[in-house]
Amino acid sequence: MSSAIWKRGWNTHPLRRRIDVLEARLLLLLCAAAVGCASMIGVAHGWAAYDHQRSVASEQRAARHLERALVLRDAARSSPWADESGRTERVPVPVRWTSASGAHVTGQAPVPLGTQRGEYTNLWLDRQGHITSAPAGEGDMWTGALAAGAGSAAVVAGVGALAGLGVRRVCNRRRAAGWEAEWSRVEPQWSRRT
């Protein structure tokens, strides 16, 4: 029976109602609009996030500089938080460097596991001479842009899905009202009641 229904097509089936055709067309239109809008908004938001990240990284590179520092204590050889991903784990140890005014400055800086006392390490300093993180790299900028674009696209797709559920609910109410009206006409003849 179901194969006979599908062979006839959704537009020529004798049991189809106008609300069924309208619902199918609305959902198809809504799906196309959601996919189109999600992709356009995702790309636009991703590029905007990339441009913003690039300007922030440029400001960071202008405000930070690399300094060579002497390690004052041996770093741990292993860490309980080390992971198996192959990344180099870093632990904080005391280091000393020379400031722009020529004074020796001591602070805590992250160094790779197993770094020995007396070795040198590179650290990033801000304009005030405080230890800070490295400026954002190209990979960080692309990761942020992709996350922003994907998030925007997901929000738009979610709104489209909610709109589709709303269309389905309205159409189901119309169908239920139509069935109720038809049943009120047919039921007295079927039950032989007047």
Image: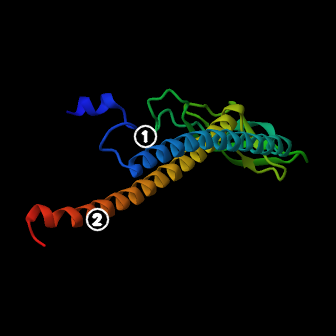
- For the point 86% across and 42% down, the residue is 62
> Residue 112 at x, y = what percent?
59, 33
> Residue 52 at x, y = what percent?
76, 45
Spatial CA span between label 2 and label 1: 72 Å
Local packing at callout 2 (Cα closer than 10 Å; few below 14, some 14-19, many 20+) is: few
Depth check: give the residue in front, 160 or 93: 160
Q: Do the residues labelled 2 and 1 touch (CB within 8 Å)?
A: no
State whether residue 119 is above or below residue 14.
above
Can residue 130 be seen from the camera position used here? yes
- For the point 31% across and 31% down, the residue is 6
Label 1: which secondary element? loop
Can you say which quadrant of the picture contains the C terminus?
Answer: bottom left
Which residue bears the numbered disc 1? 80
Which residue bears the numbered disc 2? 181
Local packing at callout 1 (Cα closer than 10 Å; few below 14, some 14-19, many 20+) is: few
Label 2: which secondary element? helix
> Residue 140 at x, y = what percent?
66, 37
Residue 2: image quadrant is: top left
Kind of residue indicated by mark 1 = Pro
Kind of residue indicated by mark 2 = Ala
> Residue 43 at x, y = what percent?
67, 38
Marks 2 and 1, the one that precedes in the sequence: 1
Depth check: give the residue in front, 178 or 63: 178
Residue 130's label in the rendered image is none
State whether residue 88 is above or below residue 188.
above
How many callouts does the rendering have?
2
